[in-house]
Amino acid sequence: MKIYKFIWAAVCLTPLLLLSCNDDFLERYPLDEVSNETFWNTENDLMVYNNSLYHLALNDDNVPILHGHFDGFNSHWGSYWFLDEFSDNLAPRHDRHAFFQQVRAGKQIVPNGGQWFGYKGWNFVRAINVGLENYDKADIPEDTRNKYVGEARLLRGWFYAEKVQKFGDVPWVDRELNIDSDELFAARTPREEAMDKVLEDLNFATENIPDDWGDGNEPGRLNRWAALAIKSRLCLYEGTWRKYHGGSNAEMWIREAAEAAKEVIDNSPYAIYNTGDSENDFNSFMRKIDISGNPEVMVWRRYQLGIYTNHVQSYFSYSGGATKSFVEDFLATDGKPISISTLYQGDDTIEDVFANRDPRLRQTILHPDDTEKYNYDRGDGRDYPRVVGMSGGFTTTTGYHIIKHYNADDMIGKAYNTAESPAIILRYAEVLLNYAEAKAELGEITQGDLDLSINQLRDRVNMPHLMMDPPMDPRYANDGVSPLIVEIRRERRVELFLEGFRYNDLKRWKQGKKLEIPDMGVQWSPENQARFEGATVQTSVDPESGKTYIDVYKGTDWANPVFDEAKHYLWPLPLDDLAQNPQLVQNPGYN
């Protein structure tokens, strides 16, 4: 059943239930008002209450787990598309995206209150715990009740795991608190203890949530397959974090990730979207308004005029553009890295960059010849690509325009905040990538595992299969991992670009030093200089190739990025929270 049918009832219901802390308060309401005494009776009551949790999760800033697009003006920064700006995938220069630039450059300041996607949203945990303390009141079969208990625990575990990934130790709370509760002034729960509790929540969820809620793959409730996919994501993060940063039971966590992903692969109804059109299948469904029924999309958020809308397409330029580093990770059509492939034609011109490359590159970054195909910038008649300083049209900081999610139809003729681009929150491709990486990290991967996972993604774009003994890309020879893991990580970067994974991946792999590499754009060759007349860019010479490239941050506050291994894998806690509870203790390096 669609969540939207219940959302307004949930909005009205939740404040009353959350405020119902004592008998005196309840006595102020007439007997026919909603209260803990009169609610919690039927399955419908539990369903409606859980709908209120999904409503709270629409606030992607406070609850950045079911991350979609913020509505209205906040679409310019609140979308999951822009999370890659924390990493080496994108190079924003817009003042409104300064926070992304600060984190990317290692110059994040300690905030007074919760920063974007930061240390906040705890009312969400309170709402979940209120429900968990009351679901037992309903006179319904236990297995029916546990569907909603599992749903709530999945959301709680996911929320806490996200906080652990950003802040380390967290204040774990699993009961409803009041103003006198000791937990309000307690120390943070150690990371490993908190994550053990997260795993308990995830396991309960995957054992009790139904395979199908009957929503027909419309935006709706998280089913068991989604719970398993989420578990594979969170367990892979925790397991690889412990493997590369130090910690106990790393193998157990990675194995949990592999087993959860394998259950989805073996038994779920989901599959890679593949019609045999290798030149379009990768991005075609990501540029549609309605993606219901798509076999690859496991969880998505619908935006609909009059209900919930966004303006995210119009803010693509705020992301700056894709980086040279990202573009260079696409393989040549022989399946080899461009550093060793004889098919690579170089980057003297934009057209050269695309020649003989993985078709996903042309479905991710705008090729000049595809401007008309995509009706880019609503068919403004200008030549693309364009870089900062050029008059008119969309410009980029790097020369690499993003086309992966672009949909001109969601802008043409539409007024501000009436756009409806959906948010793909969870797709089957990630499950395949999680499985391949987990099996490789366990040292148990086989060619059969690769064919079951990575090679399904390559089949969609007609690329050669990944084999067990790929050549080492010289660019990654010092990463301390095998050539196979290098290639699995590359596949993840290429496939999941602009879906919010890259920054977290670098953190869990302990590869933060990659963020010290300056962000570059297209080669500033004579050919490109001529076509970018009027551009105002800074350039630098690549010491390895001797070629000159756009240097996005040269001359700015972000020109010399730093990554402190003892500090920057975690974010700072806000000063206001530390003042209210000194036992929280600031993360290392931010005092």
Image (tube, rainbow, N blue to C red):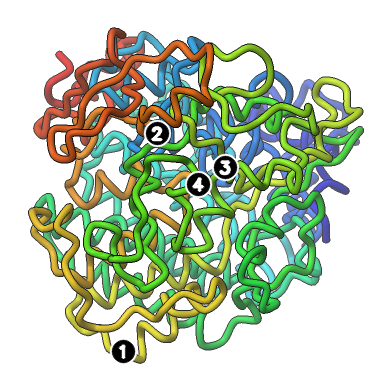
Q: Which residue is mark 3?
A: 67
The spot of residue 31 in percent (x, y) is 87, 34
Q: Which residue is mark 1?
A: 447
Q: Distance between the Cα atoms at labels 1 and 3?
A: 34 Å
Name the amino acid, label 2: Val
- In contact (CB < 8 Å): disc 4 and disc 1: no
At 21% from the left edge and 32% from the top edge, which residue is drawn?
517
N-term mark: 3 or 4: 3
Mark seen at residue 351 = 4
Residue 18 visible:
yes
Left or right: where 216 falls relative to 297: right
- Quadrant housing the N terminus: bottom right
- In contact (CB < 8 Å): disc 2 and disc 3: no
Marks 4, 1: nearer the viewer:
4
Q: Distance between the Cα atoms at labels 2 and 4?
A: 11 Å
N-term mark: 2 or 1: 1
Q: Distance between the Cα atoms at labels 4 and 1?
A: 35 Å
Count of numbered marks: 4
- SS of the residue at dot 4? helix
At 50% from the left edge and 46% from the top edge, which residue is drawn?
351
Name the amino acid, label 4: Glu
